[in-house]
Image (cartoon, rainbow, N blue to C red):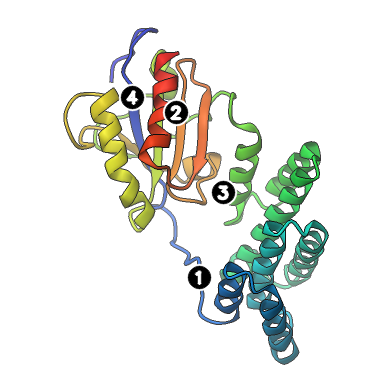
Amino acid sequence: MKRTSLRSSRLLFALSAVSLLLAVVPLCFAGIADDVHAAVVQNRLDSAEGALNSYRAEHGETPEYLDALSWLARGYLNGNQLDRAQNYAKRIEAQARQQLLKRQLDTEPHLPNALGAAIEVEAQVFLSRGQRAQAIALLRRNLARYRATSIRARLQKNLNLLGLSGQPAPPLNIAQYLGPKPNDLSALKGSPVLLFFWAHWCADCKSEGPIITQLRTEFGPKGPGLGGIPVPISAANFNNYGCSTTPTLVLLDRSGRVALYHPGVLPYETLRAAVEKTVAN
């Protein structure tokens, strides 16, 4: 791509494959974690409590138990029962740290899921109480502590949700890529840029793909499809943009600042409105 003029009306697109260099860790597991998750989704928190108590009596506070307990903490958070959510989150974090005295966090997937969720819940409780600074401090402290683990991207995602909008976009690592050689983001200033972080195994990414194609037809280079768009492949991009959720969509304005940061799918109408606003400015 060539550097565009400041008043270019084109939207530039970049795709980033976030998983090709990373081990794929399943998000769901057969057993107590699945059972509690299902009960929480159905708002049967008492049933979830009972199942957890039975499991704990037989097996103790295993990593899978803590994983399941993290779903209960999220259930109480969603029900605005902040004290109970916070208490469970702190309990999970304390027990996880005890277990980490004897093992690495990523020895298996349940403990990192539990710990990441617990920290996330604690931050959300602070936010719900209007304590934004405390939430940011909590996330930054734990990001420093667990920077070399699998929960780094999750913590960065939550921190980005609180403070990335309006800030300069983190640089993209473009040393490895698919398709045409990508430009550094600094070379794209003057035009809005849409970053689409995806994973080849992600069903939601595949459903978002046609939306990106349509927007490219309307705002970007003419013609269907996404061919010819550079695809940087980098674990550093995954971590810096907090792409523990795929897809993750990041819209940059003409100055290279983040206008939209959204982990997860976005419907066509919502994403188009954000793009149209950014292109018009």
Q: Nearer the viewer, mark 2 or mark 1?
A: 2
Write down the residue under mark 4.
12
At label 4, which amino acid type do we have?
Leu
Residue at label 3?
A: 153
Question: Dot 1 surroundings within 10 Å: few (below 14), some, or many (20 or more)?
Answer: few
Can the viewer see residue 104 in this picture? no
CB under 8 Å between callouts 3 and 1?
A: no
Q: Quadrant of residue 118?
A: bottom right
Q: CA separation, marks 4 and 2?
A: 14 Å
> Which residue type does callout 2 highlight?
Ala
Secondary structure of the residue carrying numbered label 3: helix
Q: CA distance from mark 3 to mark 1?
A: 18 Å
Of marks 3 and 1, the one in the foreground: 1
Distance between the alpha carbons at the discs numbered 4 and 3: 25 Å
Give the side of residue 270 with respect to residue 92, left or right.
left
Which labelled disc corresponds to residue 28? 1
| Mark 2–mark 1 distance (CA, rounded to whole Å) | 32 Å
Spot occupied by residue 102 in the image (x, y as percentages of width and height):
73, 73
In the depicted structure, whether residue 256 falls above or below residue 110: above
Q: Earlier in the sequence, mark 4 or mark 3?
A: 4
Mark 1 belongs to which amino acid? Cys
Q: At x 39% / y 23%, what residue is drawn? A: 276
**Quadrant including the N terminus:** top left
Image quadrant in which the C terminus is located: top left
Few, some or many residues within 10 Å of mark 2 (<14, 14–19, 20+): few
Q: Residues within 10 Å of mark 4 (few under 14, many from 20)?
A: many
Q: Secondary structure at mark 1?
A: loop
Instruction: From the image, tell me which residue sits under label 2.
Output: 274
- Identify the mark nearer the N-term, 3 or 1: 1
Instruction: Inspect the image, locate mark 3, and give the three-letter code of the amino acid beneath it.
Output: Ala
Question: Which image quarter: residue 54?
Answer: bottom right
